Image: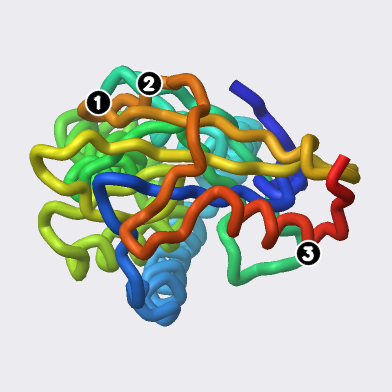
């Protein structure tokens, strides 16, 4: 698992492309409106700030603890996403902190799963796990433990504000077909009763020729992708194959043949 700062996926591989046999990619997916994350973030940020101001005297007297919680909240939020992947038998490829510097409308951090298959329900739970652990759970405990209520409710409010992009993702998932699944961050429908093969091409920074394009083939078995020998050109449902993809890579990155 990688932990990076100010880097995103394109720093590892400027381009990654897939061919899917035994299924089809979902096209024209409309994400939830950006206003969802904006409104969600504003509402909960106001709640967190109002809570802090209302209890300013307590926060002032215990500022070191407040500052520590504020610093720990983002990594704890991302570790909650990672925990869901680990609990479901998956691996975490990377946790990216501040991957889009200077872009306030983009997430401040995200977790990248290793190659796996996520159903729509699992994707909802993956996005919602920090809300369950760091907002819902502290709220319930706060009701049962008045001595810690101040801090637990602040964590709950602040994490809810930090979950604005998760909230938008969760809403968007409900507009997908029921049997949709996500592979490599791309949504698809797998054909029942057929062998499903995924072929991945990716290029590393500084590549100069076609052999620098890395190819890996996988067979889909449940939620796992099993690496298999790379054989043949592979064709998706539209007849698109490896030669066409390599031609695109060659043009995009001005690669030589050897």
Q: Are marks 3 and 2 in contact (CB under 8 Å)?
A: no
- Name the spot of residue 165 as percent of width and height, x first: 44, 61
Tag count in the figure? 3
- Residue 221 tag number: 1
Specify the quadrant that holds the C terminus. Answer: top right
In screen coordinates, is 196 left or right of 150? left
Q: Which residue is tagged 2?
A: 226
Q: Residue 153: tell me if it is visible.
A: no
Q: Which residue is tagged 3?
A: 251
x 76%, y 58%: residue:
101
Whichever of labels 3 and 1 marks the residue nearer the N terminus, that label is 1
| Image position of 34 with respect to 130: above or below | below
- State the CA–CA distance, disc 3 to disc 1: 34 Å
x 82%, y 58%: residue:
253
Specify the quadrant that holds the N terminus. Answer: top right
Few, some or many residues within 10 Å of mark 2 (<14, 14–19, 20+): some
Q: Are marks 1 and 2 in contact (CB under 8 Å)?
A: yes
Q: Nearer the viewer, residue 188 or 137?
A: 188
- Name the spot of residue 119 as percent of width and height, x first: 22, 44
Q: Secondary structure at mark 1?
A: strand
Whichever of labels 3 and 2 marks the residue nearer the N terminus, that label is 2
């Amino acid at each position: 698992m990688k932990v990076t700062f100010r880097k995103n996926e394109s720093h590892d591989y400027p381009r990654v492309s897939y061919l899917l046999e035994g299924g089809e990619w979902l096209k024209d997916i409309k994400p939830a409106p950006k206003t969802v994350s904006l409104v969600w973030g504003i509402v909960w940020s106001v709640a967190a700030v109002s809570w802090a101001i209302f209890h300013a005297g307590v926060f002032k007297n215990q500022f070191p603890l407040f500052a520590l919680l504020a610093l720990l909240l983002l990594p704890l939020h991302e570790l909650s996403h990672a925990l869901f992947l680990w609990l479901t038998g998956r691996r975490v490829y990377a946790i990216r902190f501040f991957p889009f510097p200077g872009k306030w409308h983009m997430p401040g951090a995200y977790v990248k799963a290793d190659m796996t298959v996520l159903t729509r329900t699992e994707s909802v739970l993956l996005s919602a796990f920090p809300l369950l652990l760091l907002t819902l759970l502290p709220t319930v405990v706060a009701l049962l433990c008045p001595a810690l209520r101040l801090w637990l409710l602040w964590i709950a409010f602040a994490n809810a504000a930090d979950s604005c992009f998760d909230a938008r993702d969760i809403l968007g998932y409900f507009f997908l077909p029921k049997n949709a699944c996500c592979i490599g961050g791309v949504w698809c429908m797998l054909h029942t009763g057929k062998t499903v093969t995924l072929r991945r091409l990716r290029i590393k920074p500084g590549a100069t020729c076609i052999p620098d394009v890395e190819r890996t083939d996988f067979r889909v078995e449940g939620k796992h992708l099993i690496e298999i020998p790379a054989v043949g050109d592979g064709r998706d449902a539209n007849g698109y194959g490896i030669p066409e993809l390599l031609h695109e890579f060659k043009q995009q990155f001005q690669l030589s043949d050897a």
